Amino acid sequence: MILYFHKLVESEQDCISDDMPVSSFRKGILSLLAEGYSFVSLSDYLRSSAGEKENLVTVTFDDAHHSIVKYVEVIEELDIPIMVFCPFFNVKNGWAVDEAKLSSEHSFLRKVYKQSGVLFRWVCAPFIPSGFYSKCLTFDDLDFLYKRLGDNFSIGGHGAFHIKHSVINSISVLLEVGLSRAAFKGRKGFCNFYSYPYGHYSSVSKSIVKKFGYRYGISTESGGEDDMCIRRINGKTMLSRFFSEGLK
Ligand SMILES: [Zn+2]
């Protein structure tokens, strides 16, 4: 199974949306290891046969949250490969607009921001109040993580401004995918994988992602029919189900 996570936080009280307490993450991974699952990189997982996949788990993180640096000791201790899908501008700026926080107090601003294209976001991002930013990995952090985790650390594309492909036109999709590819190609740990922001894709966006040289397109719970829409499972939901019901 391919699990996806977002931000790791200190405790349950700090969780917004898909955030996960680092202690629950650690406990969940250790439990899967104890159940006999092996953790492999996303590349190795995708290369495995259907039979082999049944006992394999791979861990991905979306959005390049800074918590991966904050909790690098935990990743190191678990000794598992991780793939981090990075939106280009989150990494370039070292921060991203925290849409979950924004939605609780500025629902109109969030609605406008979510539906805007690349150029509009570029212009409007500095006007979002700084209390609604969330810290992201920078290019220096990516180098640091690669040094620290070695082959256990990989990065892939996740858009430029992390815009849902279904709300923008093909030109903006081209910018999203192309800028992301240009920014990360050639960096240490880069793999030819593109995670669709919010897991949304269409036949047009699939072909754009493929044309830019990405080998796999990665979705969330949808897809699964071909290499350009690989299906994943929400790691937080899966691990909490695992603790309450056990694995089926
Ligand atoms: Zn994302």
Image (tube, grey):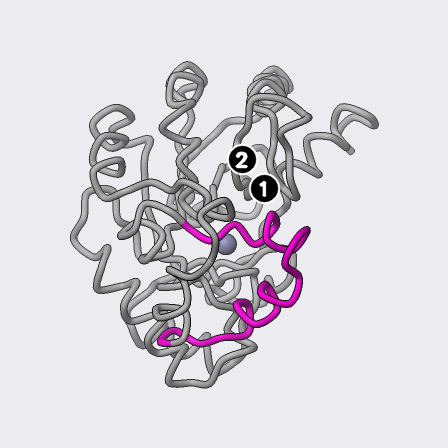
Q: What x and y, as percent, mark residue 69?
A: 36, 28
Under mark 2, the amino acid is Val
Q: Which residue is mark 1?
A: 1
Under mark 1, the amino acid is Met
Residue 92 horizontal side relative to residue 21, left or right: left
Q: For ligand 1, tell me if the residue under mark 1 lies within 8 Å.
A: no
Q: Tell me which corner region of the image, top left, top right, bottom left or bottom right, holds residue 247.
A: top right
- In terms of depth relative to the viewer, which is nearer, 45 or 184? 184
Q: Quadrant of the N terminus?
A: top right
Q: What x and y, as percent, mark residue 232?
A: 58, 50
Report the span colored magenta: 96-119
Q: Tell me which corner region of the image, top left, top right, bottom left or bottom right, holds residue 42.
A: top left
Residue 157 horizontal side relative to residue 229, left or right: left
Confirm whether the magenta stretch covers residue 97: yes
Measuring 40% from the left and 75% from the top, which residue is drawn there? 120
Measuring 71% from the left and 38% from the top, which residue is drawn there? 237
| Figure check: 240 above or below 194 | above
Residue 14 horizontal side relative to residue 135, left or right: right
Q: Which residue is mark 2?
A: 57
